[in-house]
Amino acid sequence: MSINVCNDRSMASITSLPSGVSGSSLVLLSTTTASSSSTVDITSNIDSTYKEYIIKIIDCHAETNNVRFLFNMSADGGSNYNVTKTTTIFESRHDEDGSNGGVAYSGRTLSEDLAQSTSFQKLCFGVSNDNDHAINGHIHLFDPSNTTFVKHYIGLISNVNETNGAYQYYNAGYANTTSAINAVQFKMDSDNIDAGTFKLYGVV
């Protein structure tokens, strides 16, 4: 088997890649900005154009302290966010004073996962509303328009807890439907999303 190589002597002078070498890129499809918003709904551009979509959550600030950040999916363009899901979630954590470091399966200890439920999935909890604190992360949706398989997602959320700890939440699961998923919604479990930017990308 032959090995394809780039013959250019520096990255700056590369004009094309050899046959068989490929990469991926993100195509920005929409930007939604929250401002004292009860929900953030993304109801367009999630279709059969791409096999993978990424939603980047940037500087999402809670209006109220010690709340949960949630999301759900829709199969009817956002009329209802009630897709049946089975999910799992675990967290890593470390407080500012050097205490409380560890990793925990949040489903077992806090019942934050779902088993064939239409409820909103908790992406993170104990969210701080301090002026300088915010949620950041991303959600991947895989082949949401496929009508043969269930729809998988994975998520990674970084959050400052109300006790000033660094928390990292790892989410995964599937929407147990063969219907196309074409919208998603984000919200807090109490009060509004004070601010935040939500960017939808298609993965080429």
Image: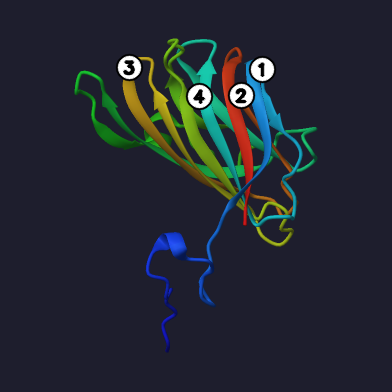
Q: Which amino acid, mark 4? A: Asp
Between discs 2 and 1, the one toward the N terminus: 1
Q: Which of the 4 quarters of the picture holds residue 78?
A: top right
Residue shown at 70% from the left, 35% from the top: 82
**CA–CA distance between discs 2 and 1?**
6 Å
**CA–CA distance between discs 2 and 4?**
14 Å
Question: Do tag 1 and tag 3 residues touch (Cβ < 8 Å)?
Answer: no
Q: Which residue is mark 1?
A: 38
Q: Which residue is mark 2?
A: 187
Query: Between tags 3 and 4, which lies in front?
Result: 4
Q: Which residue is mark 4?
A: 59
Between discs 2 and 4, the one toward the N terminus: 4
Question: Do tag 3 and tag 4 residues touch (Cβ < 8 Å)?
Answer: no
- Mark 3 Cα shell of 10 Å, populated few (<14), some (14-19), many (≥20): some
Q: Which residue is mark 3?
A: 164
Q: Which of the 4 quarters of the picture holds residue 128?
A: top left
- Considering the numbered disc 1 on the image, is that residue within a helix, a strand or a loop? loop
